[in-house]
Image (spheres, helix red, strand yellow):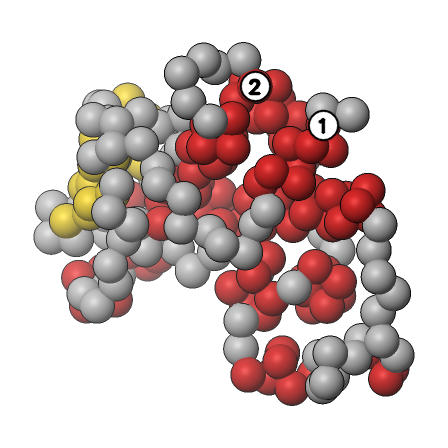
Amino acid sequence: MISKPKFKICKRLGPGVYDKCQTSKFSSSSGASGKAFGGRRPKALSEYGTQLIEKQKIRFSYGITERQLSNYVKKASHIKGAGTAEKFYEGLEARLDNVVYRMGLANSRRGSRQMVSHGHFIVNDKKVTIPSFEVKPGDIIKIREGSKTKKIFDDLVNRIKDYNPPVWLTFDAVKMEGKMLDKPKNIETFLDLNAVLEFYSR
């Protein structure tokens, strides 16, 4: 479990890591004119240093361990027929906790991870409590019957009425169920996947 203060992590890795850091308050606290905190300009990073930073961005963004990240890279590297970066991204985005987050059911991946762990979701009629569970195109994700009256799902229709999930996902707030329509498409410009792949290819 990652427990470092989110604000410090965002200062080091950028506001894209956590939703809570994507605010005007964070921007104004981060200094101006490209200067780092304390008025000092950040030193130029080496290629290796940049790769380390990008690796940390992915770890903290998705809330995964070093071992999990390494496993996603290995799996993507062994799949034939498509770009490794594309497969790498698909693996990260297909996690059940991320799918729940992308559907708009949680304000953060940490929140969605807790929701999954507490058994609030069913995938293809089976309860799943593993956040890293891989969702595949065609899979149906439902809010468990016994969880529909929980406070976390109160007024769900109104809460997500203006939210548009990625094109590869759909969610019906009235039925309280969604579906993965296709493989995840890269929408996260904040992350440099290739830099991470290069790090692990050393």
Q: CA distance from mark 1 to mark 2?
A: 10 Å
Residue at figure coordinates x 84%, y 61% from the top left: 44
The type of residue carrying mark 2 is Ser
In the picture, residue 73 is in which quadrant? top right
Label 1 crowding class (10 Å Cα cut-off): few <14, some 14-19, many 20+? few
Crowding near the residue tagged with mark 2, few <14, some 14–19, many ≥20 C-alpha atoms within 10 Å: some
Question: Is 148 on the left-hand or right-hand side of 62?
Answer: left
Contact between marks 1 and 2 (CB within 8 A): the answer is yes
Q: Quadrant of the N terminus?
A: top right
Q: Quadrant of residue 66?
A: top right
Residue type at mark 1 is Tyr
The residue closer to the viewer here, 32 or 129, is: 32
Query: Disc 2 marks which residue?
Result: 77
Residue in front for this viewpoint, 67 or 201: 201
> In this image, 80 relative to 75: left or right?
left
- Under circle 2, the secondary element is helix
x, y (%) of residue 46? 84, 50
Q: Which residue in the protein does label 1 denote?
A: 200
- Give the residue displayed 26% in from the left and 41% down from the top: 168
How many tags in the picture? 2
Please name the residue shown 88% across and 79% down the image.
Answer: 40
User: Residue at left 11%, top 46%?
Assistant: 175
Q: Does 32 appear above or below 94?
A: below
Of the pair 156 and 14, the residue shown nearer to us: 14
Using the image as rendered, state which of residue 125 and residue 85 is in the foreground. Answer: 85
Task: Give the structural element (helix, strand or loop) at label 1.
Answer: helix
